[in-house]
Image: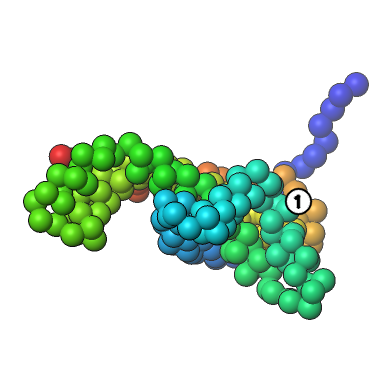
Amino acid sequence: MFGIDYSFRWRSALRALPDMLSGAWVTFETAALSMIFGVIIALLLMVMRQMNNPLARGFASTWISIARNTPSLFQIYILYFGLGSFGLHVSSWFALLAGITFNNAGYLAENFRGGLKAIPDTQMRAARSLGMNAFQAYRLIVVPQLLRIVFYPLTNQMVWAVLMTSLGVIVGLNDDLTGVTQSYNVKTFRTFEYFAIAAVLYYLIAKAIVLAARLLGWRLFRY
């Protein structure tokens, strides 16, 4: 007969909450950095895909294809264990950050390219006819419209980056939220309590990002 004899011990798990909150901050910082670097690289990849140089186009297309069609877990493994095979040793945190950044850049480059294609070519021609140079036309006309189009996909990617930081535990990262949670789990074997609290923290971080994005979007794109 099926029965449950597990006794929950939430009080002892809640004592670990300050350490888990510190880990949650490391998680958020890592995700935010991966987004900043990812956006910069994605813009470069988008520009390279528009160039006539076949090497630049090929490099950008290869990056995007690998990022979008291989698991993030493999990318982090290759950066941490694979590079070590060639004598290039990186920290767990760097491997995680680089892996998520690599993936972010691939997805965001496609978002940016799609957003750019959604802006009519007549916008650029009209700006040039008013005497703007190419840089002014992009800065004042194209980029503001592009940001409006890709803003919410950027938000979704940020949430994804936060959740993917949990993969850091597989390469020995122990100071982010999942790493701290796993450390307490190994010591106490109270798996349900600790990971339930961690899941709630991840949920709250994701919801906070979405809410902040909605408020910021309302503030920026009211008109």
Looking at the image, which residue is at 81% across and 32% down? 4
From the viewer's perspective, is 107 left or right of 130?
right
Q: Residue furthest left?
A: 130
Q: Position of residue 23 (x, y in %)?
A: 58, 63
Left or right of 9: which side holds 203?
A: left
Residue 13 found in image quarter: bottom right
Q: Nearer the viewer, residue 33 or 10?
A: 33
The vertical placement of 101 against 221, above or below, is: below
Label 1, residues with CA under 10 Å away: few <14, some 14-19, many ≥20: some
Q: Quarter of the image for the N terminus: give it.
A: top right
Image coordinates for residue 165, horizontal then vertical, percent = 61, 56
Residue sitting at 56 percent across and 50 percent down? 61
Report which residue position mark 1 lands on: 190
Between residues 104 and 125, which one lies in front from this camera angle?
125
Image location (x, y in percent) of residue 75: 69, 56
* Furthest residue in direction right, as rendered: 1
Q: Is residue 104 left or right of residue 185?
A: left
Residue at the image position 64 percent from the left and 54 percent from the top? 166
**Residue closest to the eye, 191 or 42:** 42
Q: Is residue 193 visible?
A: no
Determine the residue positioned at 82% across, 71% down: 85
Colour scheme of the rendered structure: rainbow
Does residue 154 appear to the left or right of 81 in the view shown? left
- Please, is residue 89 above or below residue 123 in the view? below
Q: As drawn, which residue projects farthest toward the top?
A: 1
Q: Does residue 62 show up?
A: yes
Identity of the amino acid at label 1? Arg
Q: Please, what secondary structure does the residue beneath circle 1 have?
A: loop
Q: Quadrant of the C terminus?
A: top left
Q: How many marks?
A: 1
Q: Position of residue 48 (x, y in %)?
A: 46, 56
